[in-house]
Amino acid sequence: MTTIEKQTVSVTTDCLCENEDGTPQENCYGDCYEWQKEDVFELLGQWYVLNKIEEDDPILIEVDKIGWTNASAYKWTTPMELDGALSLNGDFRIEWYLEEGTYNLTARRWSHDEPMGTGLFTFTAHKDCDKCGEPVVADIHAEELGMCVECSNAYFNHEEDN
Amino acid sequence: MELERHFGHDIVIARYHDLDKQPLEYAVECETCFEVITWQEA
């Protein structure tokens, strides 16, 4: 059986502020949530560096089993908004996972409508095609010298010359 | 009998750790559908 290593961080709206010795603080004004978000920023920052993702690159989020209907869903975002892209207007917990070796980023969320957790959110980095501007999966963008497959085929078939 | 497949998919052992590389827990997961089959404390 294969073994994989995953780095994980989590944020929850139900957190408790703790002192350095682990005892609960008397007053908590949401600082613990902000501290957890720092961990998320660090993990996402690693993912951006490992995958050479720039701040305006489109990111496609996909998930099956979300909400009380267990629906499938997708959403476009960018690194500027990714940390809050899975947040809800209510209580929730989100765990983020970064897999070593493949550098795949995934996440799972728990909330009132998702007591057993959602399906796994996956994140696919895209780049804009240099010709038509449409988002194209980053790996394909690199293989096709900065273009989407359609523009690359048109370019190398000299269709533009006709 | 040891579980080796999950609805026809391969299963993997996932070892979770925090940002400081401290081990948190192990899970046996489906490699394809990512479903967690069992959890175990590290």
Image: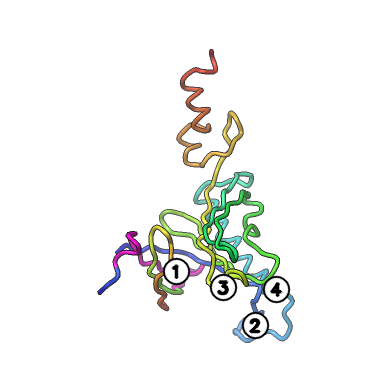
**Which residue is pictured at 57% across the width and 66% down the height?**
A109
- The CA distance from mark 2 to mark 4 is 11 Å
Q: Residues within 10 Å of mark 4 (few under 14, many from 20)?
A: some
* Region of the chain picked out in magenta, as a range: B4-23
Instruction: Identify the mark at residue A19; answer none if there is no mark.
Output: 2
Instruction: Identify the mark at residue A115; answer none if there is no mark.
Output: 3
The one nearer the camera, A118 or A140, is: A118
Mark 2: amino acid: Asn
Q: x, y (%) of residue A100? A: 43, 59
Q: Main secondary structure of the magenta part?
A: strand
Picture mark count? 4
The first of marks 2 and 3 along the sequence is: 2
**Which residue is pictured at 30% across the width and 70% down the height?**
B3
Nearer mark to the viewer, of 2 and 4: 4
Q: Residues within 10 Å of mark 2 (few under 14, many from 20)?
A: few
Q: Is residue A117 left or right of residue B34?
A: right
Nearer mark to the viewer, of 2 and 3: 3
Nearer mark to the viewer, of 3 and 4: 3
To which chain does the residue with label 3 belong?
A
Identify the residue position indicated by label 4 in the image.
A31
Q: Is residue B35 magenta?
A: no
Instruction: Identify the mark at residue B32; answer none if there is no mark.
Output: none
The one nearer the camera, A149 or A78, is: A149
Pointer 2 and pointer 4 on the same chain: yes
Where is B29 relative to A53, above or below? below
Residue B22 visible (yes or no): yes
Q: Is residue A19 left or right of residue A65?
A: right
Pointer 2 and pointer 3 on the same chain: yes
Mark 2 in CB contact with mark 1 (< 8 angstroms): no
